[in-house]
Amino acid sequence: MRGVEIILLLVVLATAVAASARRLRVPAPSLLVVAGLVVAFVPGVPAIQLSPGLVGLVVLPPLLYAAGQDLSWRELRPVWRPVTVLVIGLVIASAAAVGVVASAVAGLPASMAFVLGAVLASTDPVAVTALGRRLSLPGRLQALIQAESLFNDATSLVLVRVAVTAAVAGGAVSWYRGVGQFALLAGGGVLIGAAVAGGVALIRRRTEDPVLETVIALVTPYAGYVIAEAVHVSGVTAVVVTSVILAGQATRLTSARIRLQLHAVYDTVVFLLESVVFSLIGLELPGLVRAAGGRTGTWLVQALAITVTLLAVRALWVFPLSLAAQSRRGGRPSWRVPAVVSWAGARGVLPLAAALSIPLTARHGAPLAGRDHVLLLTTAVIVTTLVVQGFTLGPLVRRSGVALPEDHARNETATARTAMSRAALTYLDEVEDQEAAPQVMIAQLRQIQRSRLDSLEGRSDDSLRPAMRQLRRDLIAVESAVLTRLYEEGTVGAETRRRLQRRLDLEETSLTE
């Protein structure tokens, strides 16, 4: 019961912290980590030890799936080149640099130092998405940061497996084998993810039961992860690919009522999981420090040295890459965008899951030297990046001037709603020409649409007769199609599309018999 009580207390704590974070306008994950640290020092609170199964299997898949739902192939296309450079080159460079520094300052064996480097080499999609959720970043910049955090895990996890194999075996592993493992893990994860997305799409097209749809949506990330891991490929990559593919088909797979229900359920699940896992990261650190014994006086310096190394390597990659891109487009060099990208590299749940997966023993059954120290430093770096970068990323975005103006979302929404209302009026004209509906009904709906076009304020009429309700549904379908076209053309961003689609879904749901 002690574990259940702790989880329940964390949920209560997380709710209070989330409310405080919104009021203080700070990222909830950062505040949750701090709250976990504070609670850990309260007398009587037991030491927390996270299990690989809890983080890797229970928590990670739905959080990755939810993060992937915020990204689509349309947003990935313009940024795939810099993302590729970052998810391969930067991850390898970060792992090598951290390995060298960890071997020098932490006294870890070379093999375990490289394990630590591989674990911390990638930014975390859950943490980055949570930290950037409330920042008004331009669409291209947001897509770059989020895509990198979603896809660099494949490179990092391959490096972890190669490094762990070397550490357990007590020797080196051929880089040719490492490249082959990367191709197998990443490529296999993409194939499994695409197959799972295709199967789920077929099922959801034939399902109209809200309860069954909700169950399918909750099971989908676990299905992708478990199937991929069962055939020894990247489960994380499979979940991300599944999510991105299904995100682009959301409006075609389900009805408005089911989409609203799925959003509500997933928002609740993500809030609970994020709250618990980030609080547990803070709770776990003091116990790891106590278990470190004689290293308690030096672990902070070591963690800071590794954190600085990660930030320095990231800046050395991002700034030249950004300057080269600006020169190619003929623009003036600017520090603003690369500074934000460099600083948006917090570590979180994924590195923790990778560290927890390190075996306890070496090949001959002896305890794996340095494992506890690697876990301590991993957790310390995660806490440091979540607190330092989490609390300062927002001010940096505002100071750099890359944030979108406050009226950007309002203007973008007005543009989209104007185009949608005009399309609906055109459709009403076609219905009138074909005499497919009574004139009184068409006149009333035309008046509603023209009122919206003038004031850009929606309104619904619950007293509409069945025939008029059906015609209004047709108009909503037209508006939804126009919204999708505007999004695919790049006229509106993903956030505006989600907000307006939700408004259309709410209105369609209100047109009940």
Image (tube, grey):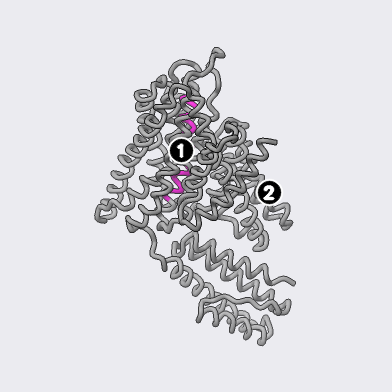
Quadrant for residue 138, please give it: bottom left
Identified by mark 1, the residue type is: Ile
The magenta segment is 144-163
Image position, residue 145 (x, y; %):
42, 48
Residue 342, by quadrant, is top left
Which of pointers 1 and 2 indicates the residue nearer the eye?
1
Judge whether 507 appears above or below 116 on screen: below
Q: Name, please, the residue furthest toward the top.
A: 364
The structure residue drawn at horizontal position 48% and vertical position 69%, both measured from the top left corner, is 413
Mark 1 vs 2, N-terminal side: 2
Q: Secondary structure at mark 1?
A: helix
Q: Is residue 30 left or right of residue 55?
A: left
Q: Which residue is mark 2?
A: 216
As shown in the figure, which amino acid type bears the numbered disc 2?
Ile
Q: Position of residue 406 (x, y in %)?
A: 41, 66
Q: Which residue is mark 1?
A: 382
Q: Secondary structure at mark 2?
A: helix
